[in-house]
Amino acid sequence: MTADRQPDTDLVWFKSSYSGGNTTECVEAALVPGGLLIRDSKRPNSLRLTVSSSAWRNFVMGARSSSDRAST
């Protein structure tokens, strides 16, 4: 994972469907070749995290697994 100031040219930023559409304390993501960028929605011109596809997949799978365990 790295942090950079990659230009916004052609990036499509999106928020989680769980964000509720409000403007507080959200992160946004944009798909890029090999992974995705993550940024603070309140500071769109600040640094972004670059996460590889495999790291993101592992994170999502771990979050889902944790959620499944919590609901049982």
Image: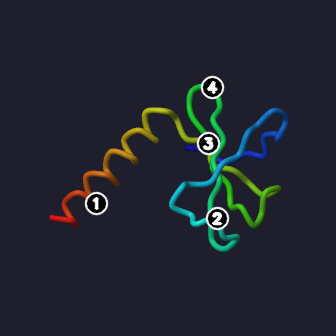
Sequence-first disc among 1 and 2: 2
Sequence-first disc among 1 and 4: 4
For label 4, count other residues whose C-alpha is less than 10 Å away and answer few (under 14), some (14-19) or many (20+): few
Task: Give amino acid for label 4.
Answer: Pro
Q: Secondary structure at mark 4?
A: loop
Task: Give amino acid for label 3.
Answer: Thr
Q: Which residue is mark 1?
A: 67
Closer-to-camera residue (12/32): 12
Closer-to-camera residue (72/54): 72
For label 1, count other residues whose C-alpha is less than 10 Å away and answer few (under 14), some (14-19) or many (20+): few
Q: How many marks?
A: 4
Q: CA distance from mark 3 to mark 4?
A: 11 Å
Q: Is residue 18 above or below residue 54?
A: below
Q: Residue at x 66, y 74 (%)?
A: 24
Sequence-first disc among 3 and 2: 2
Q: Which residue is mark 3?
A: 50
Instruction: Look at discs 1 and 4 and give the one toward the viewer.
Output: 1
Q: Secondary structure at mark 3?
A: strand
Q: Residue at x 34, y 54 (%)?
A: 63
Q: Secondary structure at mark 2?
A: loop
Q: CA distance from mark 3 to mark 2?
A: 24 Å
Task: Give amino acid for label 2.
Answer: Gly
